[in-house]
Image (cartoon, rainbow, N blue to C red):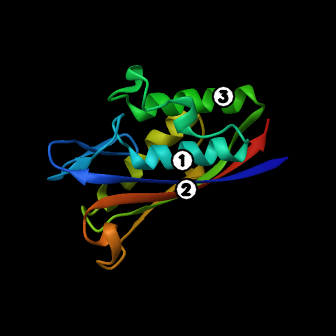
Amino acid sequence: MFRIGHGYDVHRLVADRKLILGGVDIPYEKGLLGHSDADVLAHAVMDAMLGALALGDIGHLFPDTDEKFKDADSMVLMREVCRKVRENGYTVGNIDATVIAQAPRLAPYIITMRENIARVCECDVSQISVKATTEEKLGFTGEKLGIAVHAVALMVKI
C-alpha cells in the first residue's frame, strides 16, 4: 500500500542567521528566520511525510511555542518524524523536493542535502531528490526575501 503527501514551507531571509538547507550550512550573507534552525527543506519534507499518513504537521509535533524546540536541529526533528512513520508501519518510497530561491546557488550542496535526508530517513540516496530553481526574480523568492520548498513523499507500507 502507498500513501502520498505534499509539504510546503517558507521562511524569510534575514541578517545574522545561518542558512541551513537539508542539514547543510550554506555560506551566504543571510539565513532563514524561524523558531528552530529554520531548515525550510527539512520542514517541507517532514510535512510531506506526516501528511501522507495523516499525522498532522510539524507545527503540531514541534510547536514554536515550546522553548525546547528553540534553535532545534531540523534533522534531529526529522529523525523523530521518521520514527513516527515507522511506528505507523510505513517507510520512505521516495521523496522529491524543489527549493525555490533566487540566491544563493544551491547546486554544489544538493548531493549532501540528499545524503543527509537519506541517512536520517534510513533509505538509499537514490530515493531522495532535491532540486533548486529560481522564480526569475519574481515574487518574494525572486526578490531574495525568502526561500520556499515544495516536497512530495511516497510512503510505502512495511
Q: Which residue lies furthest to the front in this view?
A: 65
| Disc number for residue 151 | 2
For image coordinates 33% across by 41% down, the residue present is: 34
Decide: is 157 above or below 111.
Answer: above
Disc with the residue nearer the chain's start (3 vs 2): 3
Q: Which residue lies furthest to the top in this view?
A: 68
Three-letter amino acid code of the residue under disc 3? Lys
| Dot 2 and dot 1 residues touching (CB under 8 Å) | yes
Distance in Å between CA atoms under marks 3 and 2: 18 Å
Task: Tell me: 115 left or right of 101.
Answer: right
Q: Nearer the viewer, residue 140 or 19?
A: 140
Q: Which of 81 and 22 is in front in this view?
A: 81
Three-letter amino acid code of the residue under disc 1? Val
| Disc number for residue 84 | 3
For image coordinates 14% across by 53% down, the residue present is: 29
Distance in Å between CA atoms under marks 3 and 1: 14 Å
| Residue carrying label 1 | 45
Q: Nearer the viewer, residue 148 or 87?
A: 148
Three-letter amino acid code of the residue under disc 2? Ala
Task: Tell me: 10 left or right of 97.
Answer: left
Tell me which corner region of the image, top left, top right, bottom left or bottom right, holds residue 55.
top right
Q: Quick one: SS at disc 1?
A: helix
Q: Quick one: SS at disc 3?
A: helix
Callout 3 environment at 10 Å: few (<14), some (14 to 19), or many (20+)?
A: some
Tell me which corner region of the image, top left, top right, bottom left or bottom right, holds residue 110.
bottom left
For image coordinates 35% across by 58% down, the residue present is: 147
Callout 1 environment at 10 Å: few (<14), some (14 to 19), or many (20+)?
A: many
Location of residue 127 in the rendering, given as x and y in whole percent from the top left corner: 60, 50
Disc with the residue nearer the chain's start (2 vs 1): 1
Disc with the residue nearer the chain's start (3 vs 1): 1
| Disc number for residue 78 | none
Location of residue 102 in the rendering, given as x and y in whole percent from the top left corner: 29, 68
